[in-house]
Image (cartoon, rainbow, N blue to C red):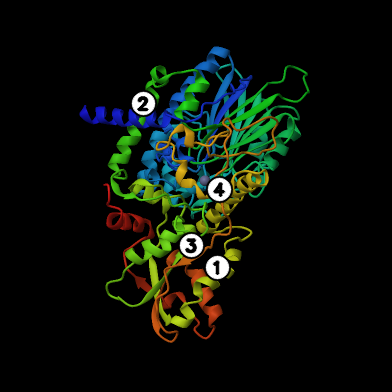
Amino acid sequence: MRHFAFLSLLIGVSASQHSLKLPVPTRQLEWKDVNFLSTSDIHGWLLGHQHATWPEPNYSGDYGSLASFATHMRRIAHDKGVDLLLVDAGDHHDGSGLVSSSSDAAGKAEDIFSMLPYDVITIGNHELYHYEDALEEYKNKGRWNGRYVTSNVNITIRSEDGSFQSVPLGEQYLKFDTEQGRKVTAFGIIFNFQAHAKGISVQKPSKLAKEPWFLEAIKDKPDYFVLAGHMPARGETAEFRPIFDAIREVHPKVPIYIFGGHTHVRDCVQYDDRSIGVVPGRYLETVAFTSSSLPQDNDDGPLDVARRYIDGNPVSYKWHTNTSDEDFDLPPIGRNISLALLRLASDLNISTPLGIAPHDYFLERHQYGHPRSVLTVFSDQVLPRTIIDKERNETRVIIGNAGSLRFDLFQGRFDRNDELTVSPFTSSFLYVELPAGLARNITEQMNKSGASKLLPSEPTTKLEEEDRVRRIYNEWMSEQWEDYLVQGGDDHLYDQVESQKIFQNDESDIPKKPRTMGFVTKDTCPGKGDDIKHYPVPHVGNQPDFVQTPFPDVNNDEIIDVVSMDFALDDFLAAVNILDPTIDLKEGHMKPYAEGLEINVVFGMYAKEMWQDGL
Ligand SMILES: [Zn+2]
Ligand SMILES: [Zn+2]
């Protein structure tokens, strides 16, 4: 009982803290005949964003508060006599500690995810990198009540007679009636993703569009189609078009509602005037509201559509459902989910503070070399202090992969969840002895050839696919910041990030109009998309792919240990062999360094040693 009281207290405190000064929406949602809430790429961020550095408080709502919001929205839809459907476009795995801290954590998080009933939900590439993860989804698809739809993903399983069989991982397609009695046909489609595990097959969407079963499924005319796809609505990897065209061949005027994801951006596109495609961003930062009129009989005109990107926090949720602190949490589902999440976090031991970070360290707001760049802390402080091989104790340089770091590291409490958020991957270390004169140039050479290697036309590994998403997302963030500067925005923000703390400053310190940092979305749909007007997050481009620890003070002919992450071994070997082809360095020449140590624990080790003040 005391345990529960404590958990409730925790929820109460964090909710009220974050409610303090968050901006309040000013425009009512445009409810129409058919309405959708869509999410994508949550990557385990079910606890919401818990730090006080901007723009994190915008996204401080946990998944329980999203469930309360969705429940109130369903009630409003019921009262209005309109449809409200909940759609998710995949990528639940890999990201926060809730899904990345142990091999079975993601499955447990998925059970909590499914406590909120979705109407249409599909799979992402992050559920398909490991066969066991995909099999877990397959075996437990029942938790989604028949709404987990994966039209172009099959999994090979052993059937009861011992033979192997390739079967659809989820449902192949959905046909259901809404509460208002409207007929819906829905598909779940992933882009032509090829870096999946063995035992999985992904069919190209253009091939899916020609499948006899697919053509049969679209034959009957529904009131509207829903396509949940793990891919963007336009640009690289956007492959909705062949499916859309196949439907249009048969039903030139039936509305088609498209919900995408994967590139982590907010976006909206209309393929024609009887459709809308919305992409809601990532990490439970945004919940997209999409609405549309339905055509009356013989009405061939354009649909009246709208979309709104709602920041994922209780202030926005309450405002849009006209609820208060007293009644927002009344539906038990939200509280039950929040409690289940806190219990899982406690079981996984990801919430114990490891240290207190003295500053914010940003991934993309400062150039590498800046003392507040997380890359600089990684190469100059964390790696040298933590990657130590007691057997060797030789002079060494360590080359780190910048792409292994995924998020900002915020001032204040630093726990295992934060650690996995910053550095979620497993990668060990390998070394080779080389002359210092050669070693001095390896990182630079890796960066010279690295960029091209990291941008292959068709990614075939997890790292390549991850880098593609990161590149697209960074281009989007960089565009927002550059637009802002071109329009005369204040670039001093760049140096004043320290003053953006919401809970430590007076109202007078918070910039005037728009007063908070956040996403500034430019899409191609009519009207304004962002629910709250923000100024963009400062963003610098051109970060290196590889960084190194400070080079030891040695003569060029001295032999030193050169340490590489196994993550980047191909790039390392290639660079050494370009610098000196006579070495002919091969994987077999590399030996384990600091054996047993993985990259996803080094920030925690550093925090336990260096960030104990104030704990
Ligand atoms: Zn994703
Ligand atoms: Zn993805």
Residue 157 location in percent, x, y? 45, 47
Which label sits in the foreground, 4 or 3? 4
Q: Which mark is residue 335?
A: 2
Is 387 above or below relative to 143? below
Quote the CA–CA distance across marks 3 and 1. 15 Å
Whether pointer 1 and pointer 4 mark residues with C-beta atoms closer than 8 Å, the reply is no
The three-letter amino acid code for the residue at tag 3 is Gly
**Circle 3 residues within 10 Å: few <14, some 14–19, many ≥20:** some
For the point 39% across and 24% down, which residue is it?
333
Q: Earlier in the sequence, mark 3 or mark 2?
A: 2
In the displayed orientation, state which residue is furthest to the front: 508
Which label sits in the foreground, 3 or 1? 3
Q: Which residue is mark 4?
A: 492
Q: Secondary structure at mark 4?
A: helix
For the point 57% across and 34% down, which residue is it?
514
Q: Which residue is mark 1?
A: 447
Quote the CA–CA distance across marks 4 and 3. 19 Å
Whether pointer 3 and pointer 2 mark residues with C-beta atoms closer than 8 Å, the reply is no
Q: Earlier in the sequence, mark 1 or mark 2?
A: 2
Residue 481 location in percent, x, y? 60, 46
The three-letter amino acid code for the residue at tag 2 is Arg
Quote the CA–CA distance across marks 1 and 4. 30 Å
Quote the CA–CA distance across marks 3 and 2. 44 Å
**Circle 2 residues within 10 Å: few <14, some 14–19, many ≥20:** some
- Name the side, left or right, on which 246 lies relative to 345: right
In the displayed orientation, state which residue is furthest to the left: 2
